[in-house]
Image (spheres, rainbow, N blue to C red):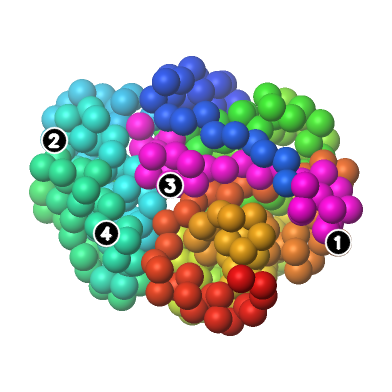
Amino acid sequence: MELFELEPRDVVKAYSFLRGKVVRTPLERSALLSEVSGREVFLKLELLQPCRSFKLRGAINALGNLPREVLERGVITCSSGNHGQGVAMAARALGVKASVVVPEDCPRVKKEAIRRFGGPFVELIEHGRGYDEAHARALELAGERGLFYLPPGEHTLIMAGAGTVGLEMLEDRPELDCVVVPAGSGGLIVGIATVVKALSPSTRVIGVQSEVSPQWVASWREGSFVEVVHRLPTLAEGTWGSVERGMFELARGRVDDFFAVSEEEIAFAMAFALRELHLVVEGAGALPLALLLSHPELVEGKEVGLVVSGGNVEESTLRRVLQASPGRA
């Protein structure tokens, strides 16, 4: 199995495997967003997974289907937080030893959750400033210890698990004209696009990232893979990091477009979600909402599905975005 292969049948197989192992999260119509935007808006609430993000899907699908000899050696991964939580929960459930490398500036709430979910099966390692340094260290340790490196997105089993989000959305609402997805390493959007385009070719799939970490957008506008893009810290830290060339090639022909939103627009969307929708949404999970609220003309169609990918956020970050985006209490 090649890392960057993914077919619709892989997603369907993952859907069958994951039944009863993850939450089939609701696709809820938002009356308020529908009224504000002038279209029917549905929210795919992946923050209702036990680890409060979609990452559990790929982690369980991977650890549950990797060869036994790989699992006996143990696995190591790198994460900005949510993937690590998914791996920790899956490792404990399956009795697999796993190491999770996170950046030193990984949100405390995510590090604590990794320790809690993984218990004695998971080693948490903090290293470096930012995702790329943590990623390099994880690869070093994999070689030194003879562990299998499980990437956060760039593996067929991970992408297939993530793609079940899109399969569920179309099962619940076949009429969706557009699906809006946070874009990080690419596992989620490529997985969703693979199955959505197979089942409903006319449905648009668009990705959103922060304008301070815009590798997808830069590559899409260039028409070819952009190796290095200057990145700054972002509220959407769950999407921070490099995109692999293979992931970009998979996205071409499946994803329709990518757009960037500002940090101020992400903060506003997080505050709006809390105040008006009563949802605690992290920055990465708020990216589709930010695009709809601030740039509705870019979200085409009468029926739109927004993937709210996660809700793991520090209390201090929530206070900061609420202060930066005044509104009614």
The answer to whether 183 appears left or right of 14 in the picture is right
Which is more toward the observer, 255 or 84?
84
Mark 3 or mark 1: name the one nearer the start of the chain: 3
Q: Amino acid at mark 3?
A: Arg
Which secondary structure, mark 2?
helix
Residue 149 occupies quadrant = top left
Q: Residue at (42%, 20%) from the top-left corner?
A: 20
Disc 2 + disc 4, Cβ < 8 Å:
no
Residue 63 occupies quadrant = top left
Residue 52: mark in rendering: 3
Q: Mark 3 to mark 4: distance in Å?
A: 13 Å
Find residue 59 and report its horizontal and vertical position in percent: 36, 37
Q: Which residues are magenta?
A: 31-60
Choose mark 2 or mark 3, whichever is in front: 3
Q: Is residue 59 above or below residue 232?
A: above
Question: Disc 1 marks which residue?
Answer: 297
Which is more toward the observer, 90 or 34?
34
Residue 111: mark in rendering: 4
Find residue 7 and report its horizontal and vertical position in percent: 57, 28
Question: Disc 2 marks which residue?
Answer: 73
Location of the N terminus by quadrant is: top left
